[in-house]
Amino acid sequence: MRTMNTHFTKILTVIGFTVVAALAAHAVPSSGATGTATATAEIVAGIQIIHLNAADLKFGQVIPSIYGDGTVTIAPDSSRTYAGVDVINSNSYTAAHFKVSGAANTSFGITLPTSIYLQLSEDASVTMLVDQFTSNPSGNGMLDATGAANLDVGATLHVHANQRHGRYDAPFSVTVAYN
């Protein structure tokens, strides 16, 4: 009898392991699971804009009309056009030139002033409007592989008839920001 019980016990043990293995192969999903990912960050240089020395926006020497208002426009390529005024043909006019630097191969947006008023050095109450600012690149620019770009800015000066003689100036700001 003992041999039968042992044999019977072995059969039950084999059957039990088979059932357990079968159940393990068809396991029911657990109520929770865990996944993993990697967090990354890249620190880049902040964008900067630097005004290049002796590269202000200069309209040059202008002779106002006695009959009406006029304009002088400096394009971003430093070319000059005028209407309703005369100008002295000298090399005293130029677009403003800036150097932009930051992360290589990155685009940036450009914000120009809407308008400013140049003030007569001797009397700040005497002004001339400057508006229609333009730039090259226009609107957006791209930093090259070294993280650099040039930015040139022009605008239009409005000269009143019989505008008072003297030197006029005013600062203006150009803003750049990563897109």
Image (cartoon, rainbow, N blue to C red):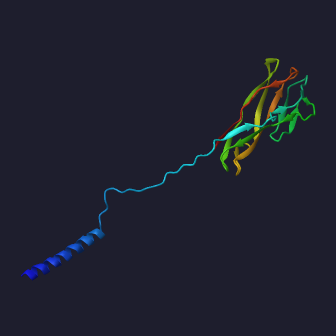
Give the farthest residue toward the left: 1
Expressed as whole percent of the image width and height from the top left, the position of residue 59 reads 85, 32
Q: Nearer the viewer, residue 112 or 147?
A: 147
Left or right position of 116 against 161: left
Expressed as whole percent of the image width and height from the top left, the position of residue 67 reads 90, 23
Expressed as whole percent of the image width and height from the top left, the position of residue 123 reads 81, 17
Report whether residue 136 is seen: no
Q: Looking at the rendering, which quadrant does residue 102 occupy?
A: top right
Q: Is residue 148 above or below residue 112?
A: below
Q: Looking at the rendering, which quadrant does residue 90 occupy?
A: top right
Total numbered badges shown on the rendered structure: 0
Left or right position of 165 against 1: right
Q: Dividing the image into 4 quarters, which one contains the N terminus?
A: bottom left
Q: Dividing the image into 4 quarters, which one contains the C terminus?
A: top right
Expressed as whole percent of the image width and height from the top left, the position of residue 21 reads 26, 72
Left or right position of 22 against 111: left
Q: Is residue 125 above or below residue 4?
A: above
Report whether residue 122 is seen: yes
Left or right position of 15 against 142: left
Q: Residue at x 82, y 17 (%)?
A: 122
Q: Residue at x 8, y 80 (%)?
A: 2
Q: Is residue 115 above or below residue 141?
A: above
Q: Looking at the rendering, which quadrant does residue 166 occupy?
A: top right
